[in-house]
Image (cartoon, rainbow, N blue to C red):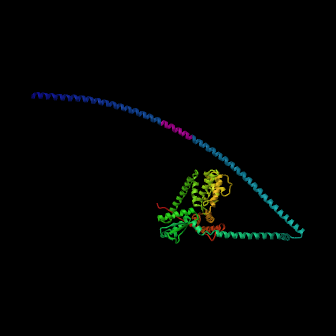
Amino acid sequence: MLNELLSGGSVAIVSGVVGFLISKKITAANFEIYVEQAKAKAIAIDNEAQTLLERAHLKSREIEMEAKKQYESAKDRAKYDLHQREEALVVQEENFKHYKQTEDEKIKSQNSVLKSKQHNLDRNENSLDVLKEKYEKKLDEAVHAVEHSAGMTKEEAKTLLLKNIEEKSRAEISHIVRKYENEAKEEGEKKAHFILAQATSRFAGEFASERLTNLVYLENDELKGRIIGKEGRNIKALETLMGVDIVIDDTPNAILVSSFNLYRRAIATKTLQLLIEDGRIQPTRIEEIFKKVSDEFEAGILAEGEELIADMNIGVMHPELMKLIGRLRYRASYGQNALAHTLEVANLAGVMAAEMGGDPILAKRAGLLHDIGKALTHDHDGNHVDLGAEVCNRYNESEVIINAIYAHHGQQEINSVECGAVCAADALSAARPGARREVLESFLKRVTEIEDIASSHAGVRQSYAINAGREVRVIVNATLVNDDESVLMAREIAKEIEERVQYPGEIKVNVIRESRAVEFAK
């Protein structure tokens, strides 16, 4: 048994060794085959790389030749363009030389003509001098001949002639003197009555105060001191910037804002209210709040105009016209609010036009725009009729509306039913008892005229009539007007107001010149 095992093991070992040797031989043979295949592939890759390299060289030479060709072409074109420009410059230079030569010849010709005319003028002057001397000699000879024939000298003849004329004209002169004496007496009486009428009608009293002031309520009287500021700095800044008169008196928990301009007074009132709520009352903050409120009011009047147009259903209207309609809220005519009057006229005109067979929408539109010029009279010269017609023409409103603007003041004939309705509605609105007060209107015209006189001088930035028209505050540009010129300007404005404006009492003219330097730390 043991022998069998040993012989089996020996056979197995021998078989393993033989197998190992055979496997090793086979592996060696396969390795040599792989090596040969790798060498063949390497040779093929090398040949392919050589081929690609040769192709790349050929491509680069082609590109180089194409680039050189394009360069030569561009170079030739540039040379051609340069040659053309040089030729053009040569032609222009020749033309300029020819033009210069022609102009020189013209100037020489004109100079020769002028010299000839000057020579003729000198000769004519000499001839006139000679003729004048001859004329004076002949005149003297004629006077001597007359004196000799009349037996009188020239002075004696003149005295006698004047005496005869005086005797004949004495009666006529007496008649003329009596005529002008009577006219002067009548004119004096009219002037006296006029002065008395003006003096009595100009007394506004409580009425002017009622219509020209706003009250601003305070939480406590300590705020009055803060509004006044140190050495009056804050109240001075408020009045100068906003163009109103701020009255701080013994009235508890209230201050008074006074100005004839409703729009300016409303902005000042709102600014003061916001400053009081904010608590920081100083010149810089005052300017910020004032600018903010002014911008809000401008936006507000446009929004109000848009709302009114939408409510009345009268069609599309230009934004500038809607803005002017909103601004009418801050205008008054004879004490009657301009916007209220306008709406009243528009509604009445629409009803009447409908009853008469006209176009009620066009009539309402004409009624709404008939006094639109009143929104411009504070900022532009001229009456509200011409200003209104001009702005409506600018924004392409219809001829019926233009006719209504002119006709409601009798400057044109009524050409349509709608225009007649507007004129009738305007008369009804104005004639309604209590609608208007003419004293306030004359007062507003006077203070507006005072502001216009001050603003017409060169170098004036702003001018405000305050204190019920008894004072005008003029703010000038410090870079254009010096201290000496400001004194002279105050005198000139006062003199012009005396000549052009009729007013009771006296008007104080304040010319304010402020130089301000501003820099920022960055």
Residue at the spot x=27%, y=29% of the render? Answer: 30
Q: Is residue 285 visible?
A: no
Residue at the spot x=74%, y=53% of the render? Answer: 113
Q: Position of residue 3 (x, y in %)?
A: 10, 28
Q: Quadrant of residue 467?
A: bottom right
Q: Nearer the viewer, residue 153 or 99?
A: 153
Q: Position of residue 60 (x, y in %)?
A: 45, 36
Q: Nearer the viewer, residue 154 or 362?
A: 362
Q: Quadrant of residue 464?
A: bottom right
Residue at the spot x=62%, y=71% of the render? Answer: 506
Residues rendered magenta in the picture = 64-79
Establish if 193 lies above or below 36.
below
In this image, 218 relative to 209: left or right? Answer: left
Q: Position of residue 220 (x, y in %)?
A: 47, 69
> Residue most toward the right?
149
Q: Is 75 one of the magenta-colored residues?
A: yes
In this image, 429 relative to 271: left or right? Answer: right
Q: Quadrant of the N terminus?
A: top left
